[in-house]
Each structure stands twice: as C-alpha cells, then as structure tokens.
Image (cartoon, helix red, strand yellow):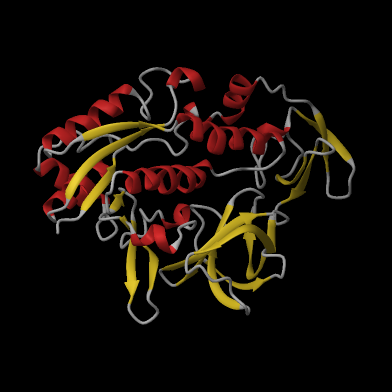
Amino acid sequence: MCKKAIIAMSGGVDSSVAALLMKEKGYTCMGATMKLYQNEDVGLRREHTCCSLDDVEDARSVAYALDMPYYVFNFADRFKTDVIDKFVHAYETGVTPNPCIDCNRYLKFDKLFQRMVELNYDYVVTGHYAQIDFDENTGRYLLKKAVDHNKDQSYVLYNFTQEQLAHTLMPLGGYNKDWVRQKAEELGLGVAHKPDSQEICFVEDDDYAKFITDYSGYKPKEGDILDVNGNVIGKHRGLIYYTIGQRKGIGAYGRPMFVMKIDAENNTITLGEKGMEFSNELTAYDVNFVSGEFPKENMLITAKVRYQAPPAAAMLCPQKDGTVKLMFPEPQRAVTPGQAVVFYDGDIVLGGGTVL
C-alpha cells in the first residue's frame, strides 16, 4: 500500500526538494504550509522573507509543479502562545530563549503531527538537515546528525519522542546544500536559488529589543552594572539588550569586559574580565532523551551549548529531580540560561534540555 506524507513546506529550497525526493520515492504527498502569524501583527514588512504571502505562493507553485495538493494550516494561536509570548517573557526576565526549538517542538512535531493523524497520513516530512534511523538491536529510532555537519540542524530537534520519530522523514539528511540547490535547478523549481530565511523568522534585522518593545509594550528599565565583587561600575539601559557573554554595547572600561550574569529580580547585570565568561559546568532542566529513557548512571558524552558551538566532551550526571548536570574538562564560553544544551554520542542525538 502506498504511504502518504504531509510535506511541511516553507516556500524555501530545502522543503521543496524534500517534497521532490518523496515524490520520486513513490509517496502520495500533500504540501502544507503552517501560517504562524500575520507579518503586520509582529511588526514586519509585508514582503518579509518568512511567513509572507510570497512564501505561500512559492510553496504553492512547487506543489503545483510536483502535482500534489497543497493547503495552508493556520496555527497562529499556538505559535503566539508557545513561541512568541514565551520568547518575549524570557528576555523580560533576563533569559535568552531559542524560539526555533519551541517552534519545532510545539508546531511542526505537535500541531502538524496531529493534523497528520487526523488526515490519516503516515508521515510528516521536513527539509531539516538531520537523519532518522532505526536500530534493529534496540527496537528504537535514532536521531542523528546530517552527513553535512556544516548544515546539521539536529541541535534544534532534540525534543523528539519515539512515536514522532517513527512518523517523521527528513530526506535531506544525506545531502549537502549545494546538491539540494542543484537538484532544484535541474527540475526547474523557481526556489532553487532563493536565499535562506533568517534564524528567528518573526524578528526583523535581529533586533530583539525593538521587537519586544513594539510587540508587548514592555518598557526597559535602567539599572546598575556590577563587577564580580558587586561594586557598581555603570548603568545599563534595560535587561533585554544583554545576553551572557556579550562584549559589545556594554560601555568602555579600559579593558575587555563581558556580561557574566543577568539578575532580573534586582535589575542588574554583572561584568567580568576576559576569561571569566567561561565555565566548567551547567545544569539543564526540561530534559528530553530521544530514547525515552532517563539515564540511571553518569555518562561520557559530547555536548553543544549553542547552535554554532563545537561539540565538547562532558560528563552527564542525572539528578533525582529530573535535571542533569554537565561537567566539562575544557571550560565552555558563555553558557547561557534559556539556551539549549544538546547531548550526543558521536553522531547520535541522545537528547537535550534548557540551561538553568
């Protein structure tokens, strides 16, 4: 019996080629774009490159070219609650969030997954650069890095459950971006050379502070800048303008200084000198292990503390309260509350959590 797949189509080249590959494999495919917000509602220009009418039309044209039905699903309410509002609240409380992880967790692999079940389809297909394998020995599905480590997106996918992995396909995991663009060009897809969208789709020009103040009406409050001994050495213009490890935009102190701590309760930021922004350990909460099993013993792993950070050796120590502690032989720079830390065994994603 022919398998049926819903292709999550953003209007970009990756999801378009993912659709093409599934059609070539003989799947019955339906294209679907998730409408997550109105550009005007989040202060973006109408022609902004993500979630715009142009993206919908690009996705629709690819679906038409591949002879498959196409629909737009409106998930704006869920996106507002679980992504945008959470993003705003995090910055207002001195935490640096990762909305792409929340979007994957609550929209692509929750709401769209539910729609797949409702429509009696077998798989959700995305254009992510990652791989899903099945381990015959353990009977479990594995989430793995993409073959092209420069494009690997496994860091933002650690919240997968076994059920979700069983019904998700990521056909680009074995290819690099140049091959994907060439494949699109060979088939005459109009999105072959379309630029990649920015990382946070609803924030224009990476100006987080402007987005927060415009969207929520939040008014940043000035506060004290402290040194590591608690001495007041300056004034900051509002917590939303700062993140851990930041050097630029904090003022001149005659030597390189970095943001070490953001204290929302007391409305202060603490600066330290070069080298002080490194740490040897962290604690993570809201932890998910892809296997579904929380480890019972300490594990030697590699971990990424940021999307662009190189994997670093670490000892993972499970705690009785469901958190995990990671200890690094080599200090890690700018370990940031609110960001994800993702655990690996070689190319296999073990899981991840949020830095406390």
Tell me where residue 322 appears, x and y as whole percent: 67, 65
Q: Quadrant of residue 196?
A: top left
Quadrant holding the N terminus: bottom left
User: Is residue 109 placed above or below 195 in the rendered structure?
Assistant: below
Question: In the image, 263: left or right of 82?
Answer: right
Q: Residue at x 28, y 28 (%)?
A: 56
Question: In the image, 181: left or right of 329?
Answer: left
Tell me where residue 57 appears, x and y as whole percent: 24, 26
User: Is residue 121 placed above or below 349 in the rendered structure?
Assistant: above
Q: Residue at x 31, y 48 (%)?
A: 126
- Camera-side residue: 171 or 71? 71
User: Is residue 158 placed above or below 10 in the rendered structure?
Assistant: below
- Camera-side residue: 354 or 337? 354
Q: Is residue 162 visible?
A: yes
Q: Is residue 342 visible?
A: no
Question: In the image, 189: left or right of 261?
Answer: left
Tell me where residue 320 appears, x and y as whole percent: 71, 70
Q: Residue at x 40, y 69 (%)?
A: 347
User: Is residue 42 placed above or below 113 in the rendered structure?
Assistant: above
Tell me where residue 187 appears, x and y as whole percent: 9, 42
Q: Quadrant of residue 93?
A: top right
Q: Quadrant of residue 26?
A: bottom left
- Camera-side residue: 175 or 108? 108
Q: Residue at x 73, y 35 (%)?
A: 252
